[in-house]
Amino acid sequence: MRLLLLLVVLGLELTLVCVHAEAKTSLIGKNFNPQKIQGKWHSILLASDKREMIEEHGSMRDFVEYIRLLDNSSLALKLHTIVDGECTELYLVCDKTEEDGVYIIYNEYNRFTVLDTDYADYIITHLRHIKNGETFQLMKLYGRKPKLSSNIKKKFGDLCQKHGIVKENILDLTEAACSISCGNKLDLVPECILIHTLQITVSRPKLEEWLEPPGG
């Protein structure tokens, strides 16, 4: 009986520790203002617990161009990636949840969280994808300018570590070819929006909101 009680107590303590750790990594809270993250961004660092997914030619290696807020409070991101040696545009829509800074991509198995931002210089995001019992994590550091301070990069590294992503799995994208060659274009959106990475199609009504980039 004493052993059973001890196991129950230890289980409760472990749960509290996990909740506390998760809360500490979510720095946004109720003060998050999605309006302020709109505009042009640059990909700085990319990290994952599955490094092969973000290395060159990896299926989750992409570069941000801009973020905007849709009328339904969803976040819309314009990205670039390399497909068959060509720079290809991607369009990603993240649907808002009841939690501040937390979004769903396509379904509840793709949870996208804005972990931290100061709006003026940087933003740190976290994507958790669960499929067939397996979990994949993707973390990104975006900057308003192509370069960020070492302090901000260290903050990103610390958050990666808290989510179980090792330092060796953090990649610097500032000198990557796609980021340099096509990451600064701002143009119109094609007839349909296809999210290449997660195979998500966005309906036509949302398309009209993409005709001009933020501030365009």
Image (cartoon, rainbow, N blue to C red):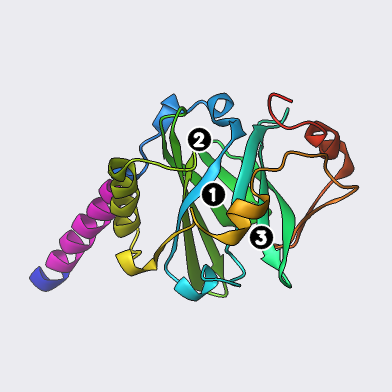
Neighbor class of circle 1 (other Cα within 10 Å; few <14, some 14-19, many 20+) is: many
Query: Is disc 1 placed on a helix, strand or loop?
Result: strand
Label 1 or label 3, whichever lies nearer to me, is 3
Neighbor class of circle 3 (other Cα within 10 Å; few <14, some 14-19, many 20+) is: many
In the rendered structure, the answer to whether residue 29 lies left or right of residue 185 reads left
Label 2 or label 1, whichever lies nearer to me, is 2
Task: Give how far across and how far down residue 182 sits, in percent.
Answer: 68, 51
Q: Between marks 2 and 1, how big is the CA–CA gap? A: 20 Å
* Residue designated by label 1: 112
Q: Earlier in the sequence, mark 2 or mark 3?
A: 3
Q: Amino acid at mark 1?
A: Phe
Task: Give how far across and how far down residue 171 sits, in percent.
Answer: 43, 62
Residue found at x 34% / y 69%: 168
* Residue designated by label 3: 81
Give the extent of the magenta segment.
Answer: 5-22
Task: Give how far across and how far down residue 76 sits, in percent.
Answer: 68, 40
The residue closer to the viewer here, 45 or 9, is: 45
Q: Earlier in the sequence, mark 1 or mark 3?
A: 3
Neighbor class of circle 2 (other Cα within 10 Å; few <14, some 14-19, many 20+) is: some
Residue found at x 58% / y 57%: 110
Query: Is disc 2 placed on a helix, strand or loop?
Result: loop
Q: Between marks 2 and 3, how big is the CA–CA gap? A: 19 Å
In the rendered structure, the answer to whether residue 201 lies left or right of residue 163 reads right
* Residue designated by label 2: 144
Q: Amino acid at mark 3?
A: Thr
